[in-house]
Image: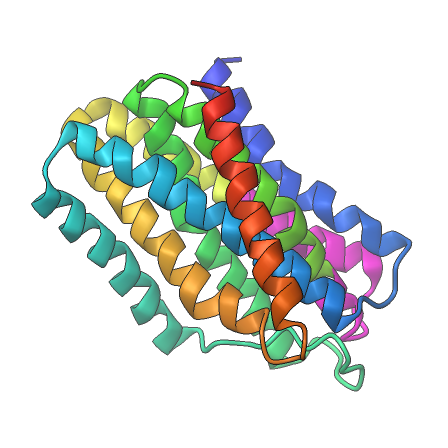
Amino acid sequence: MDSNVMVMTASALVTGLGAIPVLFIRNISHRRMDAILAYTAGVMMAASTYGLIPASLKLTNLYILGFGVLAGALLLNMLEYFIPHTDMDHERDDIILSSQSWMLVVAMTLHNIPEGLSVGASLASEIENLGLVVALSMALQNAPEGFLVAIFLVNQRVSKLIAITFAMATGVTECLAGFAGLYLVQFAMFLVPYGLAFAAGAMLFIVYKELIPESHGHGYERLATFSFLLGLLSMIGLVEWFR
């Protein structure tokens, strides 16, 4: 199997692996959830600002970068009109396969599309180690993402097996989007800087609009702040390791 395909597939399927702990855990505290969300936000922030944006600028100019970043953010903003934001309130247990549950799964699936595109575009760019770094950054945030989706569904009285299946399905969507990004860019290399900037904008939108607000408001803002910084530094360290 092509190495790019292997890297992309492994990165996406980590979402399903991250969901497996729900087999042994019933509830997760707000404190731990806030820390996980903030760490994920830090990883995605560093991947965008320290990886995708500089790589895009190497291939193009500030105007195209700005266009791509804003396009990515605007697309995610438009999607929210069709898929309203859902708080991952893990304490509710009086709903079975509610519209809220489906909404969360669809929202996370849609969020995985630009993430997959970013991995595919980064691998296709052939910029040294960029694809591997972006894939690893996605893997770092996919694991807690899969866990959060699964634990939310379990606490909505969805069976653990079905919850893990749904979490894995969101990862499969990211994998398919990665294939699309990989092969589209291979046939149209001029799209690489647009794709990288677009992915950065979409990820930054998720960080600021979704993850940071979700990690605050429960009284653990300081823990969330340091978790964010730890995620940021982890990703920067990963980038430097592969340079």
Out of 124 and 166, give the one closest to the viewer: 124
Name the residue at the right extreme. 24
Out of 229 and 211, give the one closest to the viewer: 229
Identify the image's colour scheme: rainbow, by chain, secondary structure or one colour.
rainbow
Residue at image position (31%, 18%) is 126
Instruction: Classify the position of the C terminus by image quarter.
Output: top left
Q: Is residue 92 left or right of residue 242?
A: right
Asked whether residue 173 is in view, the answer is no
- Examine the residues drawn in magenta and state their main secondary structure: helix
**Looking at the picture, how far across and down is residue 90, in whole percent?**
74, 74
- Quarter occupied by residue 22: bottom right
Residue at image position (75%, 83%) is 95
- Quarter occupied by residue 183: top left
Name the residue at the bottom extreme. 94
Residue at image position (77%, 80%) is 91
From which residue to which does the magenta span run? 151-172
Above-or-below relation of 158 to 69 = below
**Looking at the picture, how far across and down is residue 26, in whole percent?**
88, 65
Q: Is residue 103 left or right of residue 127?
A: right
**Looking at the picture, how far across and down is residue 109, in whole percent?**
51, 56
54 drawn magenta: no
**Looking at the picture, how far across and down is residue 136, in whole percent?**
54, 32
